[in-house]
Image (cartoon, rainbow, N blue to C red):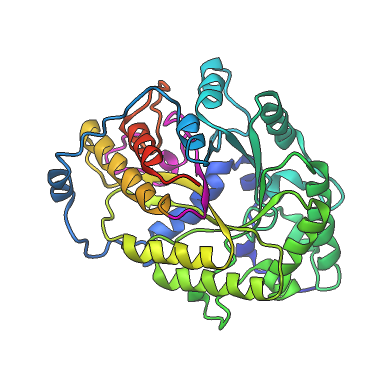
Amino acid sequence: MAKIHRSYRLSRRQTLRIGVGALTALVITALAKSKVLSYLIYPMTIDQKLQSSQRRSFRVVGKNSLKQRARAKGLIYGALPHIDSPIFDPNPQLKSTFVREFDLVVAGFYWSVTRPTVDTFNFKETDYFAKFAAKNKLLLRGHPLIWSLAIPDWLPATLTKQNAKKIFTNHIETVVKRYKGKMHSWDVVNEAINVKDGRTDGLRKSVWLDVLGPNYIEMAFRIAARTDPKALLVYNEGELEYNEEHQQGVLKLLERLKAKGTPVAALGVQSHLWGNRFDLNYKKFGKFLKNVADLGLKIMITELDVIDKDLPLDIAKRDRLVAIAYEDYLNTVLAEKAVIAVVNWGFTDRHNWITPSIPRQDGAPARPLPFDTNLQPKLAWNAIARALDRAPKR
């Protein structure tokens, strides 16, 4: 049996309790404590940023929803509907707000939920969102088919180099076949790059790399493509905004995949922004997106939110800084016409992963999303709307 490092999996209790947002939180919280996202020397302070933005009004023209504004530019606007639970909470306003504002719904397909044992699958949660999408004429997006985290206990205990390909192939074929013809897009592979792991190819050390080798990424895309040729197949990655080394690692991976004829159609850019980081080089980031587009790939902004951990307690100031982060970022990414969709990681502050996972020292709840806890649009909504209105048509 291949030796599988324990850090590649979650305990049974964790997998039972963990939700979609919490899975993201495991990764982002770790990064928050690392040198990757440590607080460096920023171009300006928070007070200076507020001062410099005083003339920005965030005024929005018209009453169109976010999805209507996106449609006018040939874009898709979507969201993960719920962070704390795979199912909507009972408040009917939550569903009605989602349907009014968004064109696309994200469903979580983590192995820890969909594959409880080697011989069984659990589609209760994902079927719920497939039905919700169909009923409300929304696009459906699946996240992710293959990831080295959020895997059940049985996988590392069972996996060997001899049986890995069979388990891997069976999982992708079973999941994708069940939703064939219903999916707008799949995150086929999630977060496979980590240049700090020291490999010459930049790949992250993982359970799949151990047992299948570096070709597991190409293999996953080919299995998904032959099972559902019509779904958009996406490679999804984080840490791209502030880390040029990571950008280059991802770009080289995409170049290798394209050179082999791998059916990867798009790059997913997670976009968990930090509201107190003003060192994002938008010119260089725009160039990175252009380099991705030049490979013939589409781009999706897949997990957009703004982490407000170290922003002021004052809600007016905090909401303004969050809105600034949204507008500045979206102005850059939407200028690239290869960007076809923007997806929020949650949509209301009532259900967000940041409050429990990256808590503020003052204990105040996070305000990272376009709608507040009462489902009222915030300044962030205005910022997103303005960026969509400003975006060139596709």
Q: Say if the magenta span includes residue 135.
A: no
Q: Is residue 237 above or below residue 90?
A: below
Furthest residue in direction top, as rendered:
92
The magenta span reads: 336-365
* Along the line of sight, the residue nearer the viewer: 3 or 187: 187
User: Can the viewer see residue 204 in this picture?
Assistant: no
Q: Is residue 209 above or below residue 267?
A: below
Q: Is residue 70 above or below residue 61?
A: below
**Residue 214 horizontal side relative to residue 347, left or right:** right
Q: Position of residue 255 (x, y in %)?
A: 59, 73
Q: Residue at x 25, y 44 (%)?
A: 311
> Residue 298: which quarter of the image?
bottom right
**Residue 374 horizontal side relative to residue 89, left or right:** left
Q: Is residue 290 above or below residue 140?
A: below
**Residue 130 horizontal side relative to residue 325, left or right:** right
Most common secondary structure along the magenta stretch:
loop
Furthest residue in direction front, as rendered:
393
**Residue 57 horizontal side relative to residue 138, left or right:** left
Q: Residue at x 63, y 63 (%)?
A: 8
Q: Residue at x 36, y 24 (%)?
A: 62
Q: Position of residue 384 (x, y in %)?
A: 38, 38
Q: Say if the magenta span includes residue 351.
A: yes
Q: Position of residue 219 (x, y in %)?
A: 76, 67
User: Can the viewer see residue 215 in this picture?
Assistant: yes
Q: Position of residue 150 (x, y in %)?
A: 64, 53
Q: Split into 4 quadrants, where in the image is the N terminus?
A: bottom right
For the image, the number of numbered tags is 0
* Along the line of sight, the residue nearer the viewer: 263 or 273: 263
* Along the line of sight, the residue nearer the viewer: 289 or 337: 337
